[in-house]
Amino acid sequence: MRKRTVITFVVTIAFLLTGLASAYAQQDIRFGVLAKRGVAKAQEKWGPTADYLGKRLKTRCVLVPLKFVEIEPALKNKEIDFLLANSAFYARFKDQYGLTAISTMINRKKDIALKEFGGVLFVRNDSSVKSIQDIKGKKLMCVKYSSFGGAQMAWRLLLEQGVNPKKDCSTFVQGGTHDKVVLAIKQGMADVGTVRSDTLERMESEGIIRMQDFRIINKMEDSYPFVHSTRLYPEWPFAACATTDPKLAKKVAKYLMLLNFTHEAMAASKVYKWTYPSNYADVTECLRVIGML
């Protein structure tokens, strides 16, 4: 009887440990990413990075494309372990939800490394709008009010030039995605649009638009290879959420920085490399100027 009891106990413990190990092994890592051009584009762009991380971590890494309005609920409800979103989301929510930047994305044009990005104000080439002051009384379309490159950068620029988009424009509307804003301007559905730098160039490379059909307002003449109207700000941070194991976060940062720009994940995302986290103080200041903080 005693022998049978011992055997039963051992089998039970083994079963429980196996179950716990299995449950742990099946615990997915959820990688939230801002779907600034829509879910399909996000899957295409960031899916290979999620697959790469999953292989290196030997755990399934699930890509979670998020609309602008879905970022805060995902953080609040602890639905994701990591977040890749625009710099303003990080600056706005890092203290409130305990985000920690573990790496910063370095963008690229061909083989040129770009650690910053800007905002673009643009109109159709046949528009009467020539300057920032001409935007008064016109219909201005941004991506979302929460889009850093597609709204907030230009918003700050306009305020500093004496134009309040909420008061001085006939309407200040949201297009939803960067592509929709560009196409709305092309089709004459709005007078002026704003998107993040590199949007127009990438849409042209995809055969969707022609750059020559648009004119840039307040075009900055510098060495930055993408057209832009605003000052430049640090690129998107890859952030660990408050409940994410710090050891896991260190591993993810390490594996991101080990990626070579020739890797398929980097080719899909058009990222040159991942580096140490940038200083996002100027992003915070931008949000203060436009009243978001």
Image (cartoon, rainbow, N blue to C red):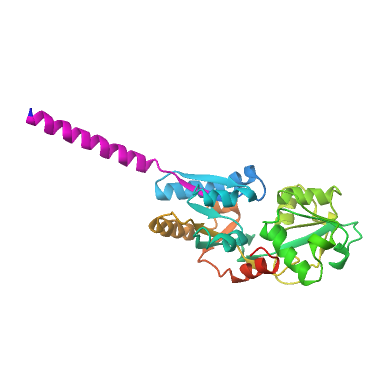
Q: Per the image, is 5 magenta? A: yes
Let me know if residue 211 appears in the view.
yes
Q: Residue at x 76, y 72 (%)?
A: 160
Which image quadrant for residue 289? bottom right
Q: Residue at x 66, y 63 (%)?
A: 292
**Image: 286 above or below 93:** below
State which quarter of the image contains the N terminus: top left
Is residue 196 toward the left or the right of residue 11 in the image?
Answer: right
How many marks are shown on the rendered structure?
0
Residue 33: x percent and y percent? Answer: 57, 50
Q: Per the image, is 1 magenta? A: no
State which quarter of the image contains the C terminus: bottom right
Is residue 199 toward the left or the right of residue 187 in the image?
Answer: left
Q: Residue at x 48, y 49 (%)?
A: 52
**Image: 277 above or below 73:** below
As rendered, which of 20 and 61 lies closer to the eye? 20
Residue 54: x percent and y percent? Answer: 45, 47
Residue 288: x percent and y percent? Answer: 66, 68
**Image: 14 above or below 120:** above
Is residue 22 toward the left or the right of residue 6 in the image?
Answer: right
**Image: 94 above or below 46:** below
As rendered, which of 211 and 174 lies closer to the eye? 174
Magenta-highlighted residues? 2-31
**Magenta segment main secondary structure:** helix
Let me know if residue 226 appears in the view.
no
Residue 147: x percent and y percent? Answer: 67, 56
As rendered, which of 279 and 111 lies closer to the eye? 279
